[in-house]
Amino acid sequence: MKVLLINGSPNKEGSTYVALNEISKTLIEEGIETQIYFIGTEPIAPCRACRACGKIGRCVINDKVNELLDIACDYDGFVIGSPVHYASSSGVIVPFLDRLFFADFMSGRKSFRLKPGTAIVTARRAGTTATIDQLNKYFQINEMPVISGRYWNMVHGAIPQEVTKDEEGMQNMRILAKNMAWILKCIECGKKALINPPQIEEPIYTNFIH
C-alpha cells in the first residue's frame, strides 16, 4: 500500500513539509509506503475549460499536472498539504488540483475513486479551517473517503522550527496518519474478502433551469 503526500507550498522543506513528513514517518511505521511530491514554484496555469483531456486522456498544458496524473493510479491514498495564504490555499495548488481532478475525471481514469484522502494545512495564525474546507471538496466530489484526526488537520508556526513545537498539531498529524493506515488496511481486507466496491453509475447532469 502506498500513500502520496502532495506538498503545495512554495517552500520545499518549509512548515507544510514538516507536517507532511510527520504523517509520512507514522505511515511508514504502520507499514505503508509513502512519497512526498513537491509541486514546485513554476507557474501552474488554470484550467482552460477546453475539455480536450476527455479526448486525449491528459491535460493539453504539459506540466507537473500530467506528471502526477500518470502516477496517481499507483497510489492507494492521498494527503494534500498547503500553507494558508490569505485565508485560502496556496496559489499553486488550486489550479494544480483543479486540472488534476478534472483531467482524471474527463479521461475516465478514475485514479482517485474510493481511495482515502485528507488535507492538512499550516499557518502562522488564522485561515486554517477555511483552507481545509476548500481542499476537502476535491475529495468529496470524487467519491473519496475523507480521513479525519482528533482535531482539524492543522499545525501552527511561522517557520518550520515553530511547527515542531506545536505539540497538539503534530500529535494530530500522527493520529491522522494512523487513521489513514487503518482505513487502507480495512480496504485491503475487504478486497481479500471479495467485497466488491460500489458499481459506477452513469452521471446524471441537471441544472437549476430544467
Image (spheres, rainbow, N blue to C red):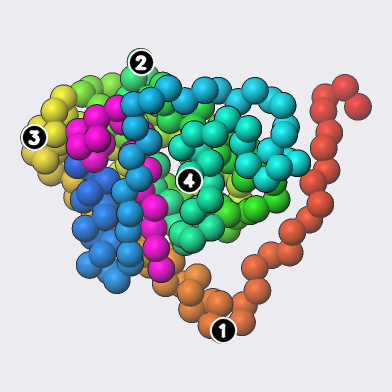
Q: Secondary structure at mark 2?
A: loop
Which comes before the other along the chain, label 1 or label 2? 2
Residue at horizontal 33 percent and vertical 64 percent from the top: 33
Can you tell which of label 3 and label 4 is closer to the viewer?
A: 4
- Residue hosting label 4: 68
Q: Secondary structure at mark 4?
A: helix
Which residue is under mark 1? 193
Circle nearer the N terminus (3, 1): 3
Q: CA distance from mark 2 to mark 4?
A: 26 Å
Q: Which residues are magenta?
A: 1-17
Q: Earlier in the sequence, mark 3 or mark 4?
A: 4
Image quadrant in which you'd find residue 34: bottom left
Say whether disc 2 or disc 4 marks the residue closer to the N-terminus: 4
Q: In the image, is residue 25 part of the stretch drawn in magenta?
A: no
- For the residue pair 9 and 148, the one nearer the viewer reads as 9
Q: Which residue is mark 3?
A: 161
The residue labelled by disc 2 is 86
Considering depth in this image, is 21 or 67 the residue closer to the camera? 67
Q: Earlier in the sequence, mark 1 or mark 4?
A: 4
Residue depicted at 26% across the width and 52% down the height: 23
Verify CB contact (< 8 Å) between mark 1 and mark 4.
no
Disc 3 is placed on an element classified as helix
| Whether label 3 touches label 1, CB < 8 Å | no
Alpha-carbon distance for marks 2 and 3? Answer: 22 Å
